[in-house]
Image (cartoon, rainbow, N blue to C red):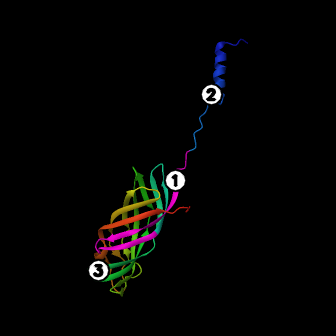
Amino acid sequence: MRVTPVLVAAAVLAAAALSPTGAARREVPAPRPAAGIKVVYRVEGTSRIHKLQSDLAIGPGLLEAEIDLVSGTITGDLTLPPSDGYFVVFGFVPTTARTDLIPVAKVTGTIKEGDVAANSRLDIALGDVAVNAQPLDVGGACRTVEPASIDLAGPFELAQMRMRGVYAIPPFAGCRGRERLDPLLTGLISGPDNAIDLTLTLLPGVP
């Protein structure tokens, strides 16, 4: 059989296509690095309750989060211990209360241009209330009628972040012992312009 130049050229091209060094070889994509990293932060700070003009200590608690470096998102679970608050009502009546900040959803946030913005939704529950050292029976179900939505922002630093925000405290319900105290506590505490200042510190070696 006569081998023509056309057949030779076709054979050469076919061999090149099958060869590992040929121009038409299949490209194997490089493995994509894992986007998310898991971190644990210690969370502590204060909240200034606007109507009472008093500070509530927050934490130390924990934020177990995953940071997606590709999409620039943060999701995490926040846990906070009860806070023992001391307030001066009406400018002269000393009042103490246990305040529970109870997360009802994951913390979510975004990282953009070196800053982080996050949101946390918390029920605020009150207990062990005492006015002028006299116990005030608020029952066992005294809490806000809906979660407080708290927006926080600050510069993003993996090792430590300081985040601040201003939020509103919703009205209270279920505050009933011997008498109904929802209107009193709502009038004393609930409302806008409550400042919050938190420091998040990375805990090394925590999986």
Q: Estimate the spatial distance between the alpha carbons at disc 1 and disc 2, rounded to whole Å.
A: 37 Å
Q: Which residue is mark 2?
A: 22
Q: Which residue is nearer to you in this view: 11 or 167?
A: 167
The image position of residue 124, as x and y in percent, is 39, 72
**Label 2 neighbour load within 10 Å: few <14, some 14-19, many 20+:** few
Boundaries of the magenta span = 32-60
The image position of residue 49, as x and y in percent, is 32, 72
The answer to whether 165 appears left or right of 68 in the picture is left
The image position of residue 121, as x and y in percent, is 40, 65
Q: Which residue is mark 1?
A: 36
**Residue type beneath disc 1:** Gly
Which of the marked residues, 1 or 2, is nearer the chain's N terminus? 2
The answer to whether 13 appears left or right of 74 in the picture is right
**Residue type beneath disc 3:** Val
Q: Estimate the spatial distance between the alpha carbons at disc 3 and disc 2, rounded to whole Å.
A: 82 Å
**Residue type beneath disc 2:** Gly
Please tell me which residue is depicted at 43% across the width and 75% down the height of the picture: 82
Please tell me which residue is depicted at 70% across the width and 13% down the height of the picture: 3
Instruction: Assign the N terminus to one quadrant of the image.
Output: top right
Q: Which residue is mark 3?
A: 89
